[in-house]
Image (tube, rainbow, N blue to C red):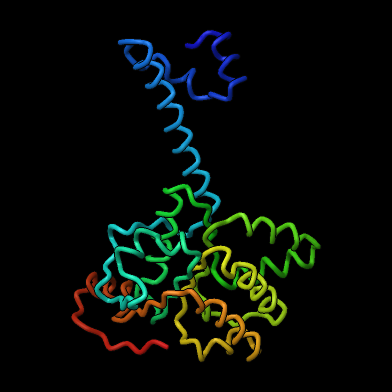
Amino acid sequence: MASDLLKAYCKELKLGNVPRVYDQFEFQDRHQYLTAVLGAELEMRRQNRIKRLLKKASFINLKTLEDFDFQTVTVPESTSVAALTDLLFLEKKQNVLMLGAVGTGKTHLATALGVKACLQGTSVRFFRAVDLANTLLEKHKNDTLARYMRELRRCELLILDEVGFVPLHRDGAELFFNVIADCYERRSVIVTSNLEFGQWTSVFGDTRLTAALVDRLVHHAHILAFTGESYRLRRALAGTGQNKLELTTA
């Protein structure tokens, strides 16, 4: 174990990992040894930061790009699969809108992009749309909305999942719009929805508010179309031995 004096020095210098790893490296020369110890400190800090970012993001399930199939995704000419997975849209403060039927992989891809962003040190927040709207209403009621908005501004990527599954309360819709407006040209937003833009009024209730919200999202955005049968349905059918089931999804 490290001596008390070493621990005290490392604490003062904020090198909290050094006492745990300094005796794990062979000493060849001073430069090699010091480089190895400090490198281990930096790597452990990086890993701890990634863990904090993943926890803070609040993903429902962790997904990766390695097990995602792009065959049923139509990628617009404004980007490419390579540019998308390299997160180039983050550098340009662009949005990614994922539209398609239920179960076609939108949440998977949105989450996988968010996880990769966390692995690269980017601050991410993941919400189901209705959950964010309800949280905003609660914060407004408790008079803590301004502080919560400041917290959201610290994230560099906001992921809003399942826009369209549940209509939002009018006040919640207005607060939701304020979040989108606050992100506009400042940070990237990923949105998943099973509805075409023309149907979003059924979610937000007000035609003008919906138009303004869509306008801010679509500007500087890459719009991906997801097609094909539900992934979950295909898995279920494979498990039961059925060959095919006709499914109509809204």
How many discs appear? 0
Q: Where is residue 176 in the image (x, y as percent from the top left)?
A: 64, 73
Of 22 and 234, the residue lying toward us: 22
Q: Which residue lies furthest to the right in this view?
A: 143
Image position of 166 (left or right of 226): right
Seen in the picture, residue 54 relative to 145 is either above or below; the reply is: above
Q: Residue at x 34, y 78 (%)?
A: 76
The image shows residue 4, relative to residue 198, as above or below, that is above
Q: Please tell me which residue lies in front, 194 or 47.
A: 47
Q: Quadrant of residue 139?
A: bottom right
Q: In this view, does 65 lie to the left or right of 159?
A: left
Q: Position of residue 241 (x, y in %)?
A: 19, 74
User: In the image, what residue occupies the spot 43% across and 62% down?
Assistant: 111
Q: Quadrant of residue 168 in the image?
A: bottom right
| Position in image of residue 206 (x %, y %) | 66, 89
Q: Residue 11's quadrant in the figure?
A: top right
> Does residue 107 lie above or below 25 as drawn?
below
- Left or right, 2 with reference to 136: left
Report the residue at 26% width, 85% height from top: 245
Of the 4 image quadrants, the one containing the C terminus is bottom left
- In this rendering, the answer to whether 156 lies above or below 110 is above
Residue 39 location (% of width, % of height): 40, 27
Residue at 55% from the left image edge and 65% from the top image edge: 127
